[in-house]
Image (tube, rainbow, N blue to C red):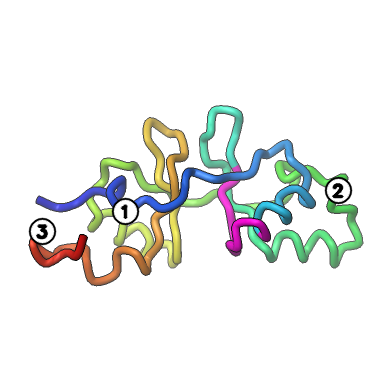
Amino acid sequence: MLKTAREYVTGLGECVSEYETVLEGARKLADLGVEELPICGEDRSVLGMLSQRDVVRVVAQRRDPDAVRIGRLDVSTVASVDADASIDVAWTTMMEHDLVQVPVTDDGRLIGMLRRADISGRRAAPRSAVPA
């Protein structure tokens, strides 16, 4: 039986709110030591991704990162994977969109991230061949 995306989720579903400032988002990125975080709506639906590049862009444009709301940034929508999708479907989604990581949702709400490195080589391996 193929494993599901839920079984490979990392993190606790950390995200930034569309109402937070870019400065608050930058602090979360730094505190968590990640290059990007999902932007979540009030219902934890994934609206896009905040990246370090977005923060740099705001600063380079001489905009005040403590005044600019994340929801006002021009970010593209991002693919996500349903928690119950097979790991092969998740892998295909990541490859089609050239993603290193993808948000995993349950009933449309963020539950965590799936990283390519965590599933590479494990997608179709028999259960006994997958290290615990």
Question: Which residue sits furthest bottom?
Answer: 121
Disc 2 is placed on an element classified as loop
Q: Which residues are magenta?
A: 30-39
User: In the picture shown, does residue 32 fall above or below 12?
Assistant: below
Look at label 3 and name its amino acid: Arg
Residue beneath the point at 51% across and 51% down: 78
Q: Secondary structure at mark 1?
A: helix
Q: Residue at x 68, y 39 (%)?
A: 18
Can you identify the residue that label 2 sits on? 66
In what element is the residue under mark 3? helix
Give above or below for 108 relative to 114.
Answer: above
Q: Amino acid at mark 1?
A: Tyr
Residue 110 coordinates in the image, percent (x, y): 46, 39
Picture coordinates of residue 69, whole percent (x, y): 78, 43
| Mark 1 neighbour density, 10 Å: few (under 14) some (14–19) many (20 or more) | some
Q: Which residue lies under the disc numbered 3?
A: 127
- What x and y, as percent, mark residue 131? 19, 65
Task: Return the disc, 2 or 1, that comes first in the chain's sequence.
Answer: 1
The disc placed on residue 112 is: none
The quadrant where residue 89 appears: bottom left
Left or right: 103, with 58 as reference point: left
The residue pinned by badge 1 equals: 8
Q: Is 28 or 81 nearer to us in this picture?
A: 28
Toward the top, the furthest residue is 43
Work out how far the residue at label 3 is from the one at label 1, CA to CA, in angstroms.
14 Å
Magenta stretch: residue 44 in it?
no
- Pinpoint residue 1: horizontal percent, then vertical percent: 9, 50
Q: Give the mark, 2 or 3, whose residue is nearer the N terminus.
A: 2
Disc 2, disc 3: CB below 8 Å? no
Task: From the image, state whether disc 2 or disc 3 is nearer to you.
Answer: 3
Q: CA distance from mark 2 to mark 3?
A: 48 Å
Residue at point 31% right, 55% down? 90
